[in-house]
Image: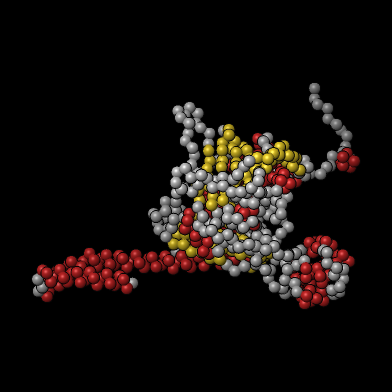
Amino acid sequence: MASKRTSEKETAESMGRRQREISISEFFLKNRHLLGFDNPRKAVMTAVKEAVDNSLDACEEARILPEIAVELVQTAPDRWRVAVRDNGPGIVRAQIPKVFAKLLYGSKFHRLRMSRGQQGIGISAAGMYGQLTTGSATRILSRTTPSSARLVEVQIDTRANKPAVLSDTDTPWQPAFPPPPDAPEGTPPPTYPHGTEVSIEMVGQVVRGRLSVEEYLKQCAIANPHLRLHYRAIPLPRPGAPEPPAEVPWTTYERATRDLPPPVQAIQPHPHGVELGVLMQMLKDSSSRTLKGVLQEDFSRVSPRVAEEICARAGLDPKTPPVRVAHREAETLYQAIQDTKLMRPPTDCLAPIGEGQILAGLRKEVPADFYTAVSRPPTVYRGNPFLVEAGLAYAKPGDNPDLAPDDTVRVMRFANRVPLLYMSGACAMTEAMEGVNWKSYGLPHPKGALPVGPAVFFLHIASVWVPFTSESKEAIAHYPEILREMTFALQECGRRLCVYLNRRRRDAEADRKRSYITKYIPHLALGLQEILGLDAPAKTDLEQRLVRMLERSKGDD
């Protein structure tokens, strides 16, 4: 019997009864690909990335030299437990559930200063993905004082975007890490009086290659040379294996420096980066009593004289209470701000890697023959301070098996010291690389593609607000100001590479000519012997003198 279908028409009332609020957790639960959890392989890498980013931010803010251990343990054919441990300051008990089980919760979104995390989504989204695919809770160990640690297990209520605490107990835990590789056998692992460990079980896949956890951590060690990083992945034993597998050793990326990045300061928004709607909201929310006070106190680079100039351009009284500025007056004020010349934002909100540290990171992890690095002066886009840094490692053909002369160059992309592995084709950094004429710098360059050669390029943008193209934070938006700075940095690297390649070419040509001369010196001496009538000892002496002259000419070059 055919199913009975209703012929009643929908009404505004019936449709209205079905309307309900959608929580941010529900939205990202159905659209987890937006956060980087669109396949099992990428899900594990994204979870590691978010946890490591949080650990590095916490350590640097507390001025602690960071040490991080990443351990992946396979618990079923399609399941892995991701555990990330750090020696940071720890997390107070009251904040643990919200940090790990509530989307859009954090301390970095409203601060204009450089940091790895920005949105307050990443680590809680990783826990949500683990909960969705395995039903397990996120397990957090945190120690803030030497007295005791807290073990908390949480899940996220996706309908309300609220944390649900499943357990909360004291535990005698102390963060421990593998001893240094050169330490004597039996050396106890280093321990710290504070730290955090987060553990999430999820459906995932661990692989090797350019888009793997291992590659991410290697690049993280390059961009953060002050970090000591440990990693291992423990798969399940193979069925029918005659013996239990040996303990999987740790891979350790040692520090190249013990200098922490300089501390950064939060800044006020720059007037040229504020849109009309945001300006109107700031006028309503300001604690200042006058319009002049709002411009001076709630924005950066606005002096009393400039504030009065803006008010005069807008035809507004500087003593006007900000809450009484009407919509039309706000539009006039906004236009006056755009027409007023202002100083660029302060740059103490940025902590660039620096040319010396880029070189240290590249030398530590990329064997090559030539290294260079460039750090551009800070500039702005949409009122946000940013700067671009570039580095280059070039290997002689055959010296580095990972860098073949007939392969395209490798491009390592970073944003606020965080490696970007995916979506390279949609990134402004790739566009800048392809837009430079690398043929003029000595590298083969197919049209519309990356150049070819045994080289690794390093590109980094540091900003108070990185313009990612999506919530997964894998590609940089194509702002003209950013593209221009990247192009300038790459061109400077190209000029230095060209000088190196030309010098190497000249040296090779000189060596080739010297080899010919060395080859024919005996014949030349024999001819001179016959012409001058010299005996054999004189001929040998002449030959030795010619060789010494050749060596001196080589030293003069």
The image quadrant that residue 61 belongs to is bottom right
Image point (17%, 67%), residue name: 523
Q: Quadrant of the C terminus?
A: bottom left
- Residue 126 in percent (x, y) is at 66, 44
80 left or right of 309 in image: left
- Looking at the rendered image, the quarter that the N terminus falls into is top right
User: Which residue shows up at 74% across the image and 39% down it?
Assistant: 164
x, y percent for residue 227: 55, 54
Q: Is residue 148 visible?
A: yes
Q: Is residue 286 left or right of residue 378?
A: right
Closest to the observer: 215 or 252? Answer: 252
Q: Which quarter of the picture shows residue 100? A: top right
Observer able to see residue 84: no
Q: Residue furthest front?
A: 147
Name the residue at the top extreme: 1
Colour style of the rendered protein structure: secondary structure
The residue sitting at 53% across, 33% down in the picture is: 236
Q: Position of residue 495 (x, y in %)?
A: 48, 68
Choose between 407 and 307: the one closer to the eye.
Answer: 307
Q: Position of residue 297 (x, y in %)?
A: 78, 68
Picture residue at 65% right of the left edge, 40% below the top: 171
Residue situated in front as seen by the camera: 452 or 137: 137
Q: Give the quarter of the image for residue 385.
A: bottom right
Total labels drawn = 0
